[in-house]
C-alpha cells in the first residue's frame, strides 16, 4: 500500500492522461470520473514497485484502459444511454472537430492515436503496453490517420 503523499503525487502527474484515455473510451464525463477514482485507488493499494517513472506511467495507462473496457462490458452499461451523449463534449470549439473525429475512430485505433500523438510514445512502447505486435501499431496508426484525413480533409496533414 502506498502513502497518501505518493498517491497525491501520482494524481498530479497522471490525472490528465487518465482523464483523456477515459474520455476516448467512454465519451462520458461521469464515467470518466468514476474510472479516475478506481485507477488511483488501485494505485494506492498496489504494493509492487516500479522500475522507473516510465514503468509507473505504463502501469497507470494499462489499468485505465482495462478499467474502461470492464465498464463498457458491464451489464448495466450495455442497457443504458448516457445523458452526456445527448449534450456536447466539454472541450473548446477549436479542438472539438478533431476530438470528435478521434472519438469516432474504431476502438482499436483510439488508444494507439492517443498514446502516439498525445503521450509521445513510440510504436514499440505502445506495442508493449497494449500487448500488440509493433507492426500492428504502425498499421493502425496509418489507417487511423487515413480515416482522420478523410473525415477532416486537408487539415489532418499536420
Image (cartoon, grey):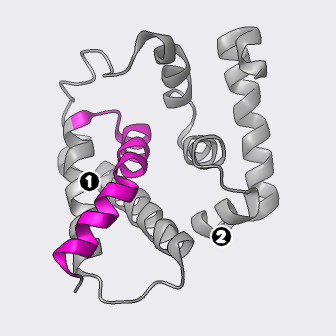
Badge 2 local density, few (<14 within 10 Å), some, or many (20+)? few
Vertical placement of residue 151 versus 108, above or below: above
Q: Quadrant of the C terminus?
A: top right
Residue 19 sits in quarter:
top left
Horizontal placement of 142 versus 71: left or right? right
In terms of secondary structure, where does tag 1 sit? Answer: helix
Q: Which residue is mark 1?
A: 36
Q: Residues within 10 Å of mark 1 (few under 14, many from 20)?
A: many
Q: Is residue 130 magenta?
A: no
Spot occupied by residue 132 in the image (x, y as percentages of width and height): 68, 64
Figure label count: 2
Describe residue 115's horizontal placement relative to residue 138 as left or right. Answer: left
Residue 39, given in percent of the width and then of the height, sits at 29, 63
Please provide the residue range marked out in magenta.
Answer: 3-29
Could you tell me what secondary structure mostly forms the magenta stretch?
helix
Residue 109 picture location, percent across and down:
62, 42
Using the rendered view, name the quadrant where residue 154 is placed: top right
Q: Which mark is residue 128?
A: 2
Residue 54, which numbered label? none
In the image, residue 42 above or below residue 112:
below
Q: Residue at horizontal 68%, vertical 65%? A: 125
Where does the N terminus fall, quadrant-wise?
A: bottom left
**Residue 12, placed above or below residue 139:** below
Report the residue that reaches farthest toward the bottom: 48
Q: Secondary structure at mark 2?
A: helix
The tag earlier along the polypeptide, 1 or 2, is: 1
Disc 1 from disc 2: Cα separation: 23 Å
Amino acid at each position: 500500500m502506498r502513502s497518501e503523499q505518493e498517491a497525491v503525487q501520482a494524481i498530479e502527474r497522471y490525472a490528465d492522461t487518465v482523464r483523456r484515455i477515459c474520455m476516448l473510451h467512454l465519451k462520458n464525463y461521469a464515467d470518466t470520473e468514476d474510472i479516475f477514482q478506481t485507477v488511483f485507488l488501485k494505485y494506492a493499494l498496489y504494493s509492487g514497485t516500479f522500475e522507473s517513472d516510465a514503468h509507473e506511467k505504463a502501469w497507470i495507462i494499462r489499468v485505465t484502459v482495462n478499467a474502461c473496457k470492464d465498464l463498457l462490458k458491464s451489464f448495466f452499461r450495455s442497457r443504458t444511454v448516457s445523458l452526456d451523449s445527448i449534450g456536447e463534449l466539454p472541450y473548446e470549439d477549436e479542438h472539438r472537430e478533431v476530438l470528435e473525429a478521434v472519438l469516432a475512430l474504431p476502438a482499436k485505433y483510439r488508444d494507439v492515436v492517443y498514446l502516439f500523438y498525445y503521450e509521445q510514445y513510440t510504436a514499440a512502447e505502445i506495442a508493449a503496453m497494449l500487448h500488440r505486435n509493433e507492426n500492428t501499431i504502425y498499421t493502425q496508426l496509418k489507417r487511423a490517420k487515413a480515416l482522420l484525413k478523410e473525415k477532416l480533409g486537408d487539415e489532418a496533414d499536420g
